[in-house]
Image (cartoon, rainbow, N blue to C red):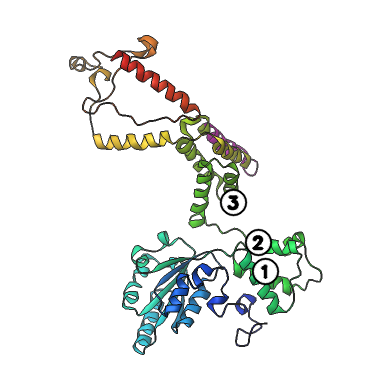
Amino acid sequence: MRAAGGPPGTAPLAERLRPRTLSEVVGQEHLTGSDGAIGRMVAAGQLSSIILWGPPGTGKTTIARLLAEAVGMRFAPLSAVFSGVADLKKVFADAEKMAAAGKRTLLFVDEIHRFNRAQQDGFLPYVERGTVVLVGATTENPSFALNAALLSRAQVLVLHRLDQTAMATLLGRAEEEVGKPLPLTDAAREALTASADGDGRFLLNQVETLFAAGIAEPLDPAALAQLLHRRMPVYDKDRDGHYNLISALHKALRGSDPQAALYYMARMLVAGEEPLYVLRRLVRFASEDVGLADPQALVQCLAAKDAYQFLGSPEGELAIVQACLYLATAPKSNAAYAAQKAAFASARDTGSLAPPANILNAPTKLMKDLGYGAGYEYDHDAEGGFSGADYWPEEMGPQIYYRPTDRGFEKRIAERLAWWDEQRKARG
């Protein structure tokens, strides 16, 4: 049982088990340990402004509160969801009064990313003067969610989703608090922690439901699944989870790992991502990372798009799987992608250089008199169907943008280009 002085027994289990010292915080030892950033701040008795970035239920609010207690600061919590400019002004006014009385304030702003840029700028003078030490909590990538001025004044600390060891510790504390073991088999116990997806608060809420159900016999995983709803994976279509998973899918495809590619693709689709978005990314990958090493890659992806639109879900999702596997197992080349960037850069740099006159059409007498089309060699009439003519502007000269690899179909392309180069030299 927990020591006296904590929340009453009627409080939710997660609240009753909230850590009372930083040493009780689980899963974030890389920050709270003696060598961690938070541990060093507490040891020095001096806090700097920080942004705690991590998934839900990993201890951000708890760490902020315990930090204030550890260094003897006043704790002022604020939620960006329910607060506006008036609330901020009051908090800052109170902090200035407390500072005049010799008491520093730790201002904790939950979901700080929900404040707009102007509101975030409002923190700056108070942070710079030391009126408050700002501790912000966010589930969103601070690089995108917070403005640069605020980030330059605060250290970003990354919290990890709780691992199996941390979750097991929470289960043990819950059983000690309630005074009896969870009514679960070993397999069901593992399934319970897996269903929480690294969220300690969610895990303890599920545990509280189990204890309240008054279950007589231990549940197996199947019975547990019937009693509890599995937690949906953390995934916001327009936020960090979205970009992390599509990046992981792209990297796994590029690394020719079909198993990992299928996993990340499944993560996205199971979490509710729009299948056509996944297909668009696969089509892009076919051109960017496979290219002419396997020209069929792009055809396969477009066929998968057509099949999905024709069949719908769930039948059409197999076509997405097929396209994913094709890309992962195809020979890779970014030669076309590199050629595009080089050619576009060259086009911007060279402006409006005129092509050589011999390859310009001459639909009028004036143009013919000016030499348009003069000396043009029709390749189909040349030996081998190749004239070897120079097609570059005189002021520029020949360039090389596309450099095929020796992988897949591009190996044949490279051989063909080399043969044409030899013919040009022979005819030059």
Q: Amino acid at mark 1?
A: Gln
**SS for dot 2:** helix
Q: Position of residue 55 (x, y in %)?
A: 53, 64
Q: Earlier in the sequence, mark 1 or mark 3?
A: 1
Asked if the stretch drawn in magenta spans residue 302, the answer is yes
Mark found first going from the N terminus, 2 or 1: 2
Q: CA distance from mark 2 to mark 3?
A: 14 Å
Q: Is residue 179 left or right of residue 37?
A: right
- Above or below, comparing residue 419 to residue 295 in the picture: above
Q: Identify the element where label 3 is drawn.
A: helix
Q: In which quadrant will I find the N terminus?
A: bottom right
Using the image, determine if residue 384 lies above or below residue 188: above
Which numbered disc flags the more N-terminal residue, 2 or 3?
2
Closer to us: 52 or 265: 52
Magenta stretch bounds:
299-316
Main secondary structure found in the magenta portion: helix
Mark seen at residue 195:
2
- The answer to whether residue 391 shows anywhere in this view is yes
Residue 30: horizontal and vertical position, in percent? 51, 67
Position of 148 compared to 25: left or right? left
Instruction: For the residues labelled 1 and 3, say whether their Cβ atoms are less than 8 Å apart.
Output: no
Identify the residue under disc 1: 206
